[in-house]
Amino acid sequence: AYPFMMQITDASQNQFCGGTLVAANKVVTAAHCMVGETTSSVRVIGGRTYLNGTNGTVSKVSKIWINPAYTDATNGDDVAVLTLSTSMSYTPASYVASTDTGVYATGATARIIGWGTTSESGSSSNQLRTATVPIVSNSSCAGSYGSEFVASDMVCAGYTNGGTDTCQGDSGGPLLIGGVLAGITSWGNGCAEAGYPGVYTRLTTFSSLVKTQINS
């Protein structure tokens, strides 16, 4: 159902982040996933719905681009683009243009996808899971996170009462609005906690940067 959903793994194919295929050989993920990694330490796996599966396509990475402005997820700029050594035959996701700022309307339904833990202290999910969460207003998110919420670079999504969220292992994966890649799973205070929505990279802000990397 989500052919663009990629596992980002270590050299032994242990998944640690998600990514989104946006071209046959380009994957969008979070900068915080790639800090400290090298092209030889990372693999990208497409077409594998289960973590313990053996199907799909395993690719090495020929280039890691991390947004040069990135310092820490709570400061924003949390985006990276991987160039794959092996092209993927799966259908890529379309992504927002820099002008598509209206997609983040408060209350809009967003879809999150990943293999992350299903509770804060739980273990990762062998099966790819998905959920929907509403976009939260900037003022509400600033109320939750204070100065750590950088509205230009981040968008929040989740229910006021919590209960549905991304968690450890989901980082780098997509936030889809209307089926289009609009955010990247970035950070949050715990997982699914009331009053603390998930925080995602606001991709419209970085769309031009990302597009340059995709076309390079």
Image: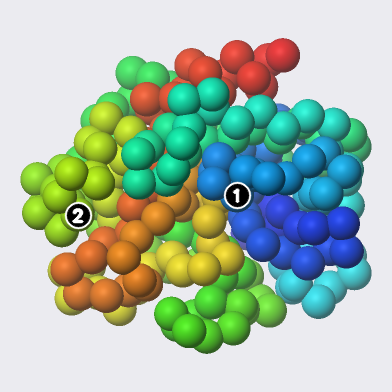
Task: Say whether residue 26 is left or right of residue 167.
Answer: right
Label 2 Cα crowd, 10 Å radius (few <14 / some 14-19 / many 20+): some
Q: How is the image coloured?
A: rainbow
- The answer to the question of whether label 1 and label 2 lie on touching residues, with beta carbons closer than 8 A, is no
Q: Residue at x 53, y 56 (%)?
A: 171
**Which of the 4 image quadrants contains residue 84?**
top right
Q: Secondary structure at mark 1?
A: helix
Q: Residue 33: give its label.
A: 1
Q: Residue at x 66, y 22 (%)?
A: 214
**Which of the 4 image quadrants contains residue 143?**
bottom left
Image spot of residue 123 (x, y percent): 59, 83
Per the model, the C-alpha gap separating discs 1 and 2 is 21 Å
Q: Is residue 175 visible?
A: no
Q: Is residue 39 above or below residue 122?
A: above
Say which amino acid is labelled 2.
Tyr
Image spot of residue 200 (x, y percent): 38, 48
Q: Residue at x 84, y 73 (%)?
A: 53
Task: Say whether residue 208 is left or right of residue 17.
Answer: left
Say which amino acid is labelled 1.
Cys
Counting labels gives 2
- Of residues 129 and 154, the one nearer the viewer is 154
Q: Secondary structure at mark 2?
A: helix
- Of residues 17 and 74, the one nearer the viewer is 74
* Sequence-first disc among 1 and 2: 1
Image spot of residue 37 (x, y percent): 73, 45
Label 1 Cα crowd, 10 Å radius (few <14 / some 14-19 / many 20+): many
Q: Residue at x 35, y 39 (%)?
A: 75
Instruction: List the residue tagged with mark 2.
Output: 145
Instruction: Check the picture and name the quadrant holding the C terminus.
Output: top right
